[in-house]
């Protein structure tokens, strides 16, 4: 648990925006892709959209979901034509070199390269930690993919700080409860946090 001290979301978003600008400066005809589940990661692609003053293309199903949020700044940036935007949101599972190369080919030469981001907590690396500039992309021909440690769940540190602030009478874990060793280890963390001033 203690290994998952994610960098703050704002830092990851700043890294993504800086990286995007750097790539676009080198190759203006770069398609920017952000991988996402049905919901989640909106702040990542909204920040890119705001920084580039670009519309956000995604499929009709995701657009319906996003419109239902009632976020005016997001809603006004959505578009239904994949040719009219350089920022596309695709399913997280499709963010790999082969799929993105095929996707690029469907855009009829409008773009020469793809810069994609896989924002997920599963890409977190203790070696990189909070030093986002140490993240190495995976590149293959004209497709570059960055796995960035972005999670919308609380990190271990955020959870600890929250428990220490709130001081609940009882904590009932819902994850990592499959065996007694895991449960005991978690309860030891909780006891330690609740003892602190």
Image: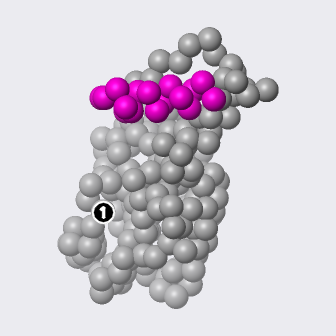
Secondary structure type for disc 1 = loop
Q: Nearer the viewer, residue 197 or 150?
A: 197
Q: How many marks?
A: 1
Q: Nearer the viewer, residue 101 or 180?
A: 180
Q: Quadrant of residue 142?
A: bottom left
Residue 191 placement (x, y as % from top left): 60, 24
Task: Please tell me which residue is depicted at 50% across the width and 39% down the height of the picture.
Answer: 153
Q: Is residue 176 above or below residue 11?
A: above
Residue 31 visible somewhere in the drawing? no
Residue 186 placement (x, y as % from top left): 48, 30
The quadrant of the rendering that contains the C terminus is top right
Q: Quadrant of residue 25?
A: bottom right
Colour convention: one colour
Task: Please tell me which residue is depicted at 47% across the width and 62% down the height of the picture.
Answer: 125
Q: In the visual, does 131 lie left or right of 67?
A: right
Q: Badge 1 local density, few (<14 within 10 Å), some, or many (20+)?
A: many
Q: Is residue 177 magenta?
A: yes
Q: Is residue 43 magenta?
A: no
Residue 68 placement (x, y as % from top left): 45, 31
Task: Please tell me which residue is depicted at 37% across the width and 37% down the height of the picture.
Answer: 64
Q: In the visual, does 29 lie left or right of 195?
A: left
Task: Please tell me which residue is depicted at 38% across the width and 71% down the height of the picture.
Answer: 145
Q: Nearer the viewer, residue 100 or 72?
A: 100
Residue 181 placement (x, y as % from top left): 37, 31
| Residue extending farthest top | 169
Q: Is residue 139 above or below residue 126?
A: below
Residue 190 visible somewhere in the drawing? yes
Q: What's the magenta bit mostly, secondary-structure-wise?
A: helix
The part of the chain drawn in magenta is 176-192
Q: Nearer the viewer, residue 158 or 194?
A: 194
Q: Which residue is mark 1?
A: 95
């Amino acid at each position: 648990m203690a290994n998952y001290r994610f960098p703050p979301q704002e830092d990851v978003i700043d890294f993504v925006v800086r990286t995007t600008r750097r790539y676009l400066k080198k190759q203006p005809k770069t398609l920017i892709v952000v991988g996402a589940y049905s919901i989640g990661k909106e702040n990542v692609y909204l920040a890119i959209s705001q920084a580039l003053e670009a519309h956000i293309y995604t499929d009709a199903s995701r657009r319906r979901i996003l419109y239902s949020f009632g976020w005016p700044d997001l809603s006004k940036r959505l578009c239904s034509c994949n040719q009219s935007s350089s920022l596309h949101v695709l399913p997280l599972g499709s963010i790999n070199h082969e799929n993105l190369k095929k996707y690029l080919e469907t855009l009829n030469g409008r773009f020469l390269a793809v810069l994609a981001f896989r924002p997920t907590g599963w890409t977190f690396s203790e070696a990189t930690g909070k030093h986002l500039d140490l993240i190495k992309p995976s590149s293959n021909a004209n497709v570059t993919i960055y796995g960035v440690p972005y999670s919308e769940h609380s990190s271990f540190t955020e959870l600890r700080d929250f428990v220490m602030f709130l001081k609940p009478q009882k904590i009932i874990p819902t994850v990592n409860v499959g065996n007694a060793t895991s449960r005991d280890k978690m309860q030891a963390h909780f006891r330690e946090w609740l003892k602190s001033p």
